[in-house]
Amino acid sequence: MFLYVLGLLVLFCLYRWIRELPRVPDKTDKYVYITGCDTGFGNLLARHLDKQGFRVIAACFTEKGEEDLKKSCSSNLTTAHLDVRSDDSVNKVAAMIKDRVGERGLWAVVNNAGVAIPSAPCDWLTIDDYRSMLDVNLNGVISVTLSVLPLIKKARGRVVNVASVFGRISPTGGPYSVSKYGVEAFTDSLRINMIPFGVKVLCIEPGFFKTNVTNVDIISKSTNMLWDKLPQEVRDDYGPDYLQKVDKVLKEKLSKMCDGDLMKVVHSMEHAVSAVTPRSRYTVGWDAVFFWLPLSYIPSCVFDYIMSKGAIPIAKSIE
């Protein structure tokens, strides 16, 4: 029985591998709009797709990001300044894209722009802390998508949203998982809505990778700033040495958990853009596939027990 099941599994994997091999033709006529191209996944994807012949529109938040891409890519790549929090900025880039693509439409938008701070226990944060991240990670994704959706419908193209495996499970406090759960929900609803138009809507769910999102120095600095603003009552709840424990965990564990091979994610993004038959979801990274995703399916009481056992102890914990 075991061998029978194993054989079926091998056949399924082989079938899926063969089915997903073909790539779309005429790449040189297809425009791909990518957000968050200053660094990390977006930057690497812009370079990768440019080499493959796609006409890339790389949106960056900084002038330096634009200049670096122009120097390292072909003349087919176009850069644009984009602040996903600003309706004016989003609409300005969308208008530029409309003029550039014409009647052929936009083949794909890759919503990659995102931030990971502020990140801390929920009772350290204010509604403004939540709002600042949701404006980028969730509202920014929705705003950019809706601004170019008519162009994507015209091309019968793709929407590729970069969420996170933390859009499936929420092991920490703060707005990050909240925003990524929202991206997952938006992706699901849009995917169903766009089926009649021939538009594919796809989701990338990375685990821990070495990007600015997991940069220990950035996270530690943010955590220290939040701690300094806390009322004394909250600090007493956690204890005077709690911040030092957080810094120790970040430096000793987070860096070891992160995969340095960013191309694993980039190849999944490229497949979502260029495959004739892309997947609805791409869960990327060994930690995501074999730890976080399975953990999301276990009963909540078991998940809570596992998380509480691995949590940093606080001063006023109720046994």
Image (cartoon, rainbow, N blue to C red):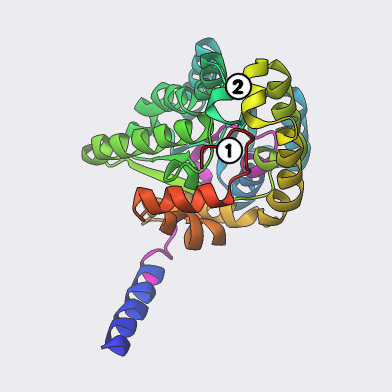
Mark 1 surroundings: few (<14), some (14-19) or many (≥20) residues within 10 A: many
- Residue 277 numbered mark, or none: none
Q: Is residue 225 above or below residue 185?
A: above
Q: Is residue 30 left or right of residue 231?
A: left
Whole-percent x, y for residue 208 in the image: 60, 50
Please, is residue 170 above or below residue 136 in the view? below
Q: Tell me which amino acid carries mark 2.
A: Leu
Badge number at residue 56 = 1
> Would residue 28 appear left or right of 63 to someone viewing this image?
left
Image position, residue 295 (x, y; %): 43, 55
Residue 171: percent from left, percent from top? 50, 43
Question: What are the residue bounds of the magenta stretch?
Answer: 18-43
Q: Tell me if residue 29 comes above or below residue 239 in the rendering.
A: below
At x 29% / y 82%, what residue is drawn? 5
Residue 4, position in %: x, y?
27, 87
Instruction: Say which residue appears at 55% left-offset and 45% top-offset.
Output: 54
From this view, report whether residue 19 is shown above or below residue 282. below
Q: Which residue is mark 2?
A: 82
Q: What is the total number of numbered labels drawn onto the structure image?
A: 2
Label 2 SS? loop
